[in-house]
Structures are given as structure tokens and as C-alpha cells.
Amino acid sequence: MALTEKEVIEVLKSIKHPGSGRDIVSESMAENISVGKDRVSFRLNTGGRKDPFAKSVARACERALKQAFGESLQVDAEIIEKKPEAASPANSLLPGVKNIIAIASGKGGVGKSTVAVNLAVALARIGYSVGLIDADIYGPSVPAMMGAVDARPGIREEKGRNIIIPEEKYGVRFLSIGLFVAADSALVWRGPMATGAFRQLIGDAEWGELDYLLFDLPPGTSDIHLTLVQEVSVTGAVIVSTPQQVALADVIKGVAMFTSEDINVPVLGLVENMAWFAPAELPGNRYYIFGRDGCKKLAEKMGLPVLAEIPIVQEIREGGDSGRPAALDDAVTVPAFDALAKNLVEAVKKRNETLPPTKRVEIRKSGH
């Protein structure tokens, strides 16, 4: 019997704790799952309390696993009463942030930053507390899109340490390396300098309590992506693409990076940007300039949802150039970005109910 950990987790999700009514995976009660030939072992952690239901839960787990995979399966469930450990220094970088979302793209030029900025504004519009970090260190665009090119974040000192105060506009707190340098200055940094600056945007800033913190990542894959998954526990990734085949080919690489065994960040869905063009004088007409349903077909093939289809609309480009995002008040684009925000919220909710928290990536140094 070739079982996988994922299959075992799916069965354990069916076991509800009698006290809370929630499944034991969502409760973070099932841990240290190990799968071998005809054997499954795991721990039921009661979180440091005496749990009168622990033994009955263990028996329910055993019955469900044997029913699913055969009576010959050996099931070892160890009950422990271990209190949750305090957050590690890296996790405590963002103690008040509930969900960390990576906004990524396989290639440049697909409107990833435009989607990230308008998604942040749309989430704020429907009542969520939102932060946005421009992680494109070499080509920051968030300051211009947020109308904050000349803004400079405040700094306060706390216990001999400088704390950055994020800018706030349109209900969104945001930071970008572009807020610390002149708009016409070229950043010529080696990799370690760029990742060091990125770490400061995360750990040296006063983000406070946030429902969502979005990271507008550089296109492709880079040191910045690896730094992000090393520094914080990423709730999930959103991949932005246009419908054309050359862009979709790179989407596959982006999804593969996040879902690789070493990184293991869930992909929440795809966003198809520039899905069609509808002229203002003929709003009912749609012209599929970059192809039709490219993201939809790829998403179906990969088992992922399409979170939104964003049309090519002049107001989106104008909003980015003027620093007033189109998601604020444009009648044509607001529904598209509102739908994206609501679909993301649902995707995150489903992810948090069905999957354990993402673990930060640890780089293991091999011995010599």
C-alpha cells in the first residue's frame, strides 16, 4: 500500500473534535504524520490541556484510516499535551498579520503590479485591513501607482532600533524601496543588498494588525522569492498572467516553484489580466487581443481556480499612471476587482480550513 501524507490528512479532516466541532486538522491537533508501508503514525496534540475526548478522537482516527485504506493498516496515534511553542524570531516579524499573500507572475509585462495594487484597494474597500509590500526591489512601481512618488516613510526609534512607519493611502498601508530613493535613480545592487533591503521592509516596519499583507513580487523566480518563504509563512500565492501562450508557459514554472516539495506554498488561483478589450463606445463588444480563455483552460488542467478576469480598459492604465487605482471608483473596473477580492477571501478561507499553516523554508547547509 503506497499511501501519501496528503491522503492521510484528507481522512483526518473528516474527524471532528467533539468539544469544538472542528476537524482535528483545522485545530492543528494532528501533527508529525509519518507514512510507511502498511503503517501510519501521528501525534494528537491537545495543546497543553487535559482533553477528555483525546482517546475517543484517537479511536475515531484509527477506524477512519482503516476503513479508507484497509483493516491491515497499522495505526499509531500518540496523545501528547504539549503547549504551543512561542513564535520563532522570523515568524514574529509579522505577529499581527493573519494572511500573507504572494502576488507573482511567470514573466514581466502581464500587469502583476497593477493587479496587486488594485486588489489591495479592493480588499480595503470591502472592509479588510490591508498592507502591501513592493518586493520588486530593482523596478519598484507601487509608489507611482499609489500616487506616492514624493512620499517618504516616517522613522521612529524604539530601544535603539529604527522602525519604519508604512505610508497609508486609500485604506492600504504600503512600503516600497522606491519610497527611499529618488524616482529617477537607478538601483544597482548585488543580490545580498537587494534581499537585505527586502528583509527590512518586512521586519523593520510597523505593520500592526492586518487581515492581509500582499507581496508584489518581481516577475519570474529570484532570490526575493526565496527570501520571502524563508522569512515568513506564506498563506498562499496568486499567479497573474495574460491569455497568450508565451505567458502561460511561464505560469506553469511559477506554479511549480511555489508547490515544489521544498517550498510548498499553496497556489490559491490564477488571475487572467488583459482578458479582453471592450471599447468605451461599444461596451458590449469584446475583442480577445491576446487569445481567449487561456488562463481558464490552463487552470482547469492544473486543478486551480481562476480568481478573476480583468479586461483591458483605458481607465486601469490611467489609474496606474495618475496614482489613483481604478478599483476605487471606475464603474467598468470596480466589479472585476471586487470579484477578485471576494474570490481571494473565499480561497484563503478554504485554504485555512483544509490545510495546515505553511512552514517557512529552512536552508540546510550540507557538511563537507
Image: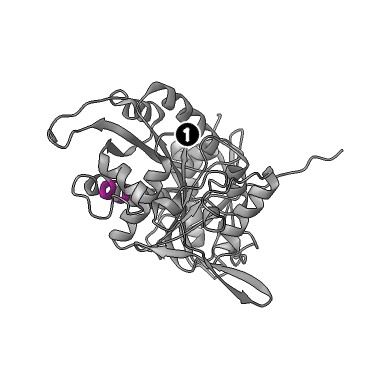
Quadrant of the rendered image containing residue 296:
top left
Mark 1 element type = loop
Q: Is residue 136 left or right of residue 126?
A: right
Residue at horizontal 53 percent and vertical 45 percent from the top: 136
Provide residue 350's location: percent of width, then percent of height: 37, 49
Residue 272 position (above or below residue 11): above
Residue type at the position of mark 1: Gly
Provide residue 294's location: percent of width, then percent of height: 33, 25
Residue 83 position (above or below residue 63): below
Provide residue 108's location: percent of width, then percent of height: 47, 34
Residue at horizontal 42 percent and vertical 51 percent from the top: 144
Say whether residue 277 is magenta: no
Q: Quadrant of the C terminus?
A: top right
- Region of the chain picked out in magenta, as a range: 337-341
Q: Nearer the viewer, residue 157 or 224?
A: 157
Q: Is residue 279 left or right of residue 266?
A: left
Q: Residues within 10 Å of mark 1 (few under 14, many from 20)?
A: some
Residue 54 position (above or below residue 234): below
Residue located beneath label 1 in the image: 108
Q: Quadrant of the N terminus?
A: top right
Dominant SS type (magenta): helix
Query: Tell me, what colour scheme is on the image?
Result: one colour
Kindly tell me whether residue 344 is visible in this rendering: no
Residue at horizontal 42 percent and vertical 44 percent from the top: 113
Kindly tell me whether residue 352 is visible in this rendering: yes
Q: Nearer the viewer, residue 110 or 126?
A: 110
Provide residue 268's location: percent of width, then percent of height: 41, 42
* Count of number-bearing discs: 1
Q: Residue furthest bottom?
A: 159
Q: Is residue 106 left or right of residue 281?
A: right
Q: Nearer the viewer, residue 13 or 208?
A: 208
